[in-house]
Image (cartoon, helix red, strand yellow):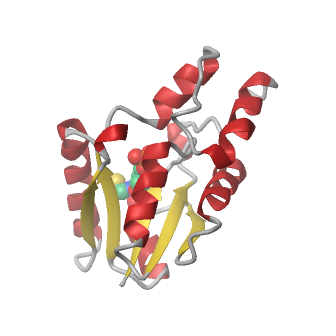
Amino acid sequence: MKAVYPGTFDPITMGHKDLIIRASKIFDVLIVGVALNLQKNPLFSIDKRISFLEKVTDNIRNVTVDHFDGLLVDFAVKHGTNIILKGIRAMTDFEYEFQMAQINQNLNKEIQTLFLVTNQKYSFLSSGAVKEVAINRGSIKSLVPDEVHDEIVSCFRNGMF
Ligand code: PNS
């Protein structure tokens, strides 16, 4: 079975990595879909967000990274799957995700959205929190994967933003 796991990943967090690892043990193939999502005004470029994900998933043989602009349901169809995988941290996530799942169902009735509950170690964590801490020069060591930690920190230190 194949699934797509979409997100803005601005940037990838430990919560994302944990979910990707768990999902890679459930599905035969997992496509991580990095949304261009310009309306969300991402801090990191699409190339950087993809490159962080590629580094983190490099040694997971059934995970690939792709990007998309446009509708998620079309991205899923392009990859030959009807399964969209999402992570849920709390009830607040659920309300939003529930609505998205129904919109996607409306757009394409074949599409099924499945939810994985976030590891409780990371239920507080979001890309927004990572940016907030890093911008204020706090440590993000335990918040982002080791493989990309130094590069993310250097983006903030070198005044890239
Ligand atoms: O990590 P995020 O920011 O919560 O991910 C949001 C994402 C990329 C899953 C969402 O913005 C999305 O699906 N974008 C593609 C456009 C789309 O298909 N929207 C759903 C119908 S409104």
Tell me what residue is drawn at x 17 percent, y 39 percent: 91
Compared to 95, does 3 lie above or below? below
Residue 92 % position (x, y): 21, 36
Q: Quadrant of residue 123?
A: top left
Q: Quadrant of residue 160?
A: top right
Residue 158 % position (x, y): 82, 25
Q: Horizontal placement of 93 versus 158: left or right? A: left
Q: Which image quadrant: the N terminus?
A: bottom left
Question: Depth check: 146 or 71 in front?
Answer: 146
Q: Residue furthest right?
A: 158
Tell me what residue is drawn at x 51 percent, y 65 percent: 32
Q: Is residue 3 visible?
A: yes
Q: Quadrant of residue 114?
A: bottom left
Tell me what residue is drawn at x 50 percent, y 61 percent: 70
Q: Which image quadrant: the C terminus?
A: top right
Q: Horizontal placement of 101 versus 50: left or right? A: left
Residue 49 % position (x, y): 64, 50
Residue 68 % position (x, y): 56, 63
Tell me what residue is drawn at x 59 percent, y 63 percent: 57
